[in-house]
Image (cartoon, rainbow, N blue to C red):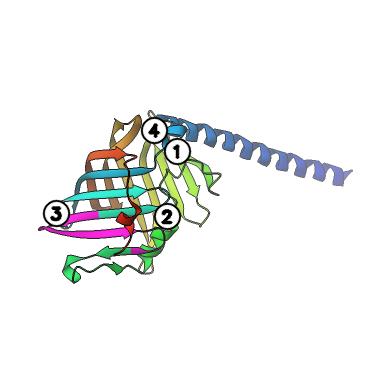
Amino acid sequence: MRFNRVLSGVLVIAASAVALAAAQSSSVDEIVAKNLAAKGGVEKLRGVTSVKTKGRIKGPRGDLPVIVWTMRPNLMRREVTADGQTQVVAFDGKMLWGINPMMGGRPQEITGPAADRTRQDADDFDSALLDYAQKGSKVELLPGEGAAPRLKVTKKNGTVQVIQLNPETFLEDRITMEVDQAGRTTELATELSNYKPVSGMMVPFTIRQTINGKPAAEVQYELVEFNLPLDEGLFRMK
């Protein structure tokens, strides 16, 4: 009789845990759906094949013009111009490479932690929340700070992001993640604001990054274009 009572108690606890997990999953899916709808809808987001952004980046080197091209599935090229010289960083899907005028101006492969993170995050052409289950990611709802929903995204490769959404618009306000820099754990935070509609999608025109709470860089977009016909050669080292 006592064994039966203990067994019943265990089953009740297990059932409660399953019900809690199911409730959280439902809540997570509802929040993710609101976020994707706010940004333009799943079909619009899935239909993006390329993005070109043009603006200015404020950082240790001053206020500099920057152009970034990205192309599905994971191609990227960034150009920053200072004193009439253009620095290039690009990813061709396998290799990270760059051109630094201060180091001879010849294309060179980039290795180390920065290259490793780029490879790990190569699936980030889309939002981390878009089709997250198909990507092998796990999304959990964290205790909120006030009314702002906070989602913890654990990717298939183990990378973890915490995405804080605006409680009114459900667009991303802040994304934080921990990265390893020279053997030390560093918190990298990205703050997104000044959203504007572009081709039926909401885009943050101001992006600010901090490292361990200290300002690192800020980008102000002047132009955002979707689905331009880009040549893959733009991303290859030549």
Work out whether 198 lies above or below 57. Answer: above
Q: Which residue is mark 3?
A: 62
Q: Nearer the viewer, mark 4 or mark 1?
A: 1
Q: Nearer the viewer, mark 4 or mark 3?
A: 4
Q: Callout 1 environment at 10 Å: few (<14), some (14 to 19), or many (20+)?
A: few
Tell me if residue 89 is in the magenta stretch. Answer: yes
Amino acid carrying label 2: it is: Asp
Judged left or right of residue 116, residue 221 is left
Amino acid carrying label 4: it is: Lys
Q: Callout 4 environment at 10 Å: few (<14), some (14 to 19), or many (20+)?
A: many
Q: In the orientation shown, which residue stands out farthest toward the bottom?
A: 104
The quadrant of the picture occupied by the C terminus is bottom left
Discs 2, 3 touching: Cβ within 8 Å: no
Q: Which residue is mark 1?
A: 46
- Mark 4 to mark 3 CA distance (whole Å): 31 Å
Picture coordinates of residue 157 (x, y %)?
A: 51, 57
Judged left or right of residue 137, residue 189 is left
User: Who comes first in sequence, dot 2 or dot 3?
Assistant: 3
Magenta range is 79-96
